[in-house]
Image (cartoon, rainbow, N blue to C red):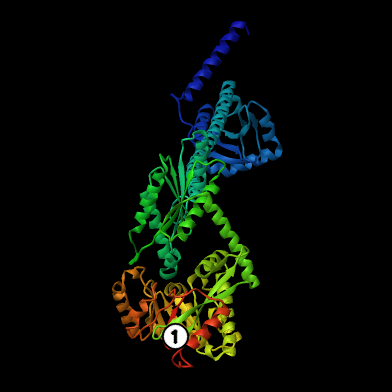
Amino acid sequence: MGRLAILEEAHRQTLDALELAATMGIPQGVKPLGTVVQILEETAGRLRKLLKFKALAFFLVREPGGELYLARCHPPGKARDMQEEMRILTESGSAAWALERKRPVFTSSGVSDGQLLLHSLTTASRIRGMFLGRLGQDIKTISDASLSLLTIVLRGGASLLEGLELYGLLRQANSELKAKVRDLEDSQRSLKREIEHRRKVEEQLKHMALHDPLTGLPNRTLMRDRIQQAIRRSQRHNSAAYAVAYMDLDKFKLVNDTMGHAVGDKLLIQVGERIVASVRQLDTVARFGGDEFVIFLEELTFPGEAVRVMKRVRQALAEPFEIDGNTIRITGSFGLVFGPVRLLNPDSLIKNADTAMHMAKEAGRNRIKVFTMKMRGLAKMTAGLATELRRAVNAGRTDVLFSPTLSTTDLRLCGFEAVPCWQTKDKRVLRGEELMDVAEKAGVAWELWRRTIEKALVLLHGWRTENEAFTRLLVTLRLGRTQLPETGLADAVCAALKTAELPGSALHLEIPEDTLAVGGESLIEQIADLKDCGVRLCVGDFGERFFSFQGGRGSILDSLSMQSPKSTRRGGDALQPALDSLKFLAKALDLPAVEGGERSDNAELLSTLTCLGLQRDSLSRPVSAEEVVQLVMQTQQCSTGSPDETKPSGPAQTTD
C-alpha cells in the first residue's frame, strides 16, 4: 500500500472516530456533578452508543476495605449474573490483569456465551473500580477508535466519580469548618461573657475588700490608703492640710441589747447616711466596725473648718431616728487630729483620733475633742493603770470602802454601801465609778465587783459577831451594766453570803434600769433566784431606760430609785413634778421609792411623802472598815430611840 493510501485510511478512521464521538453528544456548558448513580447512568449511555452490550455493570471500590461492590447494572435483571461473572474473573486473576492495562481487555468466564469486556475505572491518583460489559457484537466489528473512545469515556467517568468524592469531602470539610467556626464564635461569646462576669466579680471583690458590707462605706483598708496618699501629698506640698476624725456612737450597745441587732444594723446604716450627707463631697467616711466611724477631711483651709464639719455631723445625729416603729435618739463622741504632722503614718493618726474620742467620752459624751500630746500621755497612763489593776484584782490586792446609808424617816444609820477601792503603785487611790471605768478597760469589772461583795459581807459578819449594833445594818452594792456577767450572778452572790455566814436580808442589791434592760430575761431569772435567797433588790435610775414590769416582774423587787435632776439647787419646787411621778409609780407598784439628790435638804421635801427615802446622797466621804466601827459606835451613843432589831426603818439614803 502506498503512502497516500495509508494517509487516506488514517483520515477516514479519524473522521469515523469524530463521527462516533459526535454521536455520544457533547455537553453544553458547566454541568453539576450530580450523584454516583447519575454519573454511572450517563457513562453507561455513552458506552452503549459506542458498542453493543447485552449487559454492562460498574463495580466500585469500597473504602476502606478495598473490595469491589456492584454499584450499577444494565439491565437490572442481570445484576446477579454480572456479580457472578466478576467473582470468577477476580478469582481467575483476569480482573487484576485488566487493572494493569490501559486498554480494554476481552475475556470470557464460562458462565454465559459471548465475550466480556473488562476495563479499569482509574484516574491519575487511584483506582475507582472496574467496568464489565457483555458484548452484543463480534469483536472483529469493533474498531480501534471505538475502543479508544471507550477508554476516554470510562476515565472521564472515573474522574467524575473522584471529583464527586472530593466535592463531598470538601463539603464535609466545609461543614466541619463552619461548625468549628460556630463553636469558635460561641466560645468567643462565652469567653466574652466569662471575662465580663469575671471583671464584675473582681470589681465586687475589690469593692468588698475596700468597703463595709453593712453600710457600703469605705472600710479600714481604703481609709488607710486615702490617708497615706494625703500624707505623701503633704510631704510634697506643705500647704496640703487635712484632719482625721474618729467617731463612736454613745451607748449603742444598749440599742442592740434592747431592740435587737436588726434594728442596730439599720441604725448604723442611717447613721452612715447622715454622716455622708453632712460632710463635704471630697471627704471620706469609713466604718471601722461596730459603731465606730472615721471621717477623713482633706484640703482644709484652716483647722476650724474641720470642727465646723464635725458640728454639722453631731447636729445631724441629734435628730431622732425612726426604725421599725421605734424612735431612737443617739449621740456620738468625736476625736479629731490635724495634719500634716511629720513622722506619722495612717495608723498613728487614727490611733491619736481614737484617743481624743475616748477623752470626749470620759468628758461626758456627745463632745468633740482635738488631740493633744497630753492626751497620749493620759492614754498611756490609763493603759498602764488597766494592766496594773488587772494584776491587782487577780492577786486580790483590792480593798473596799463604805459609804453610810441613812433612813429618810429619822436619819438613822441603816447600813453602808460597799465601794470598791484600790491604791496604785504611786499611792493614788481610785474608788467607785472612777475605779470601775478602769476595771472595764482592763476587762475585770465583774471580778472586781465579785471580790468587793465578798470582802464587804465578810467584814459585815465580823462586825455583827463582835457588836450587836451591827445586827440591823445592811450592806448595799450597786451592780452596773459593765459589771454584769454573762452567767453566774446569783450563784456568786449566794456563795458570798454562804461564805460570810449571813442571811440574804443582810444584802441590799441596787441594779440600774439599763442593766436590767441589757440583761433581759436571763438576768430577771437570776434576780428571782437572789430574791429566793432573801436579798433585797432595788431598781436604780428608774424611768431612764426601757425596763418593763409586765409579767409580775415587780413582785421580785423591793424598791425603786430615781436619779434627781441636776437643777436641785434652784429649790425644792423644781423637783415637785418628778417627785409626784415617783410617788404615783411607787404607790401603783406598792414599792418604796428612793430618790437620789445632790443636797441634804432634799430629805425635808421627801420626808413629807408616804414613800420616802434618799439614796447615794453625798453627806460624807466613804470610810474604811476601821472608821465604820467608830461611826457605828458614835451613832449608837447619839441614838435617842430603841430601833427595831430585826428590820430597817425604811428605804436608805447613801452618803458618799
**Residue 179 visible in image:** no
Q: Secondary structure at mark 1?
A: loop
Q: Nearer the viewer, residue 341 or 154?
A: 341
Q: Residue at x 52, y 31 (%)?
A: 43
Q: Residues within 10 Å of mark 1 (few under 14, many from 20)?
A: many
In the image, residue 341 sits, relative to residue 624, either above or below, namely: above
Q: Nearer the viewer, residue 599 or 380?
A: 599
Task: Tell me residue 262's x, y (percent).
Answer: 42, 65
Quadrant showing the N terminus? top right
Task: Tell me residue 433's x, y (percent).
Answer: 50, 69
Q: Residue at x 60, y 10 (%)?
A: 6
All told, the count of numbered labels is 1
Task: Tell me residue 134's x, y (percent).
Answer: 58, 35
In the image, residue 266 sits, relative to residue 99, either above or below, namely: below
Task: Tell me residue 165's x, y (percent).
Answer: 55, 35
Q: Residue at x 46, y 35 (%)?
A: 239
Q: Nearer the viewer, residue 275 or 1?
A: 275
Quadrant of residue 78 in the image?
top right
**Residue 278 visible in image:** yes
Q: Nearer the viewer, residue 520 or 395?
A: 395
In the rendered structure, the answer to whether residue 302 lies left or right of residue 401 reads left
Looking at the image, the residue that sits furthest to the right is: 92
- Location of mark 1 (residue): 412
Q: Amino acid at mark 1?
A: Arg
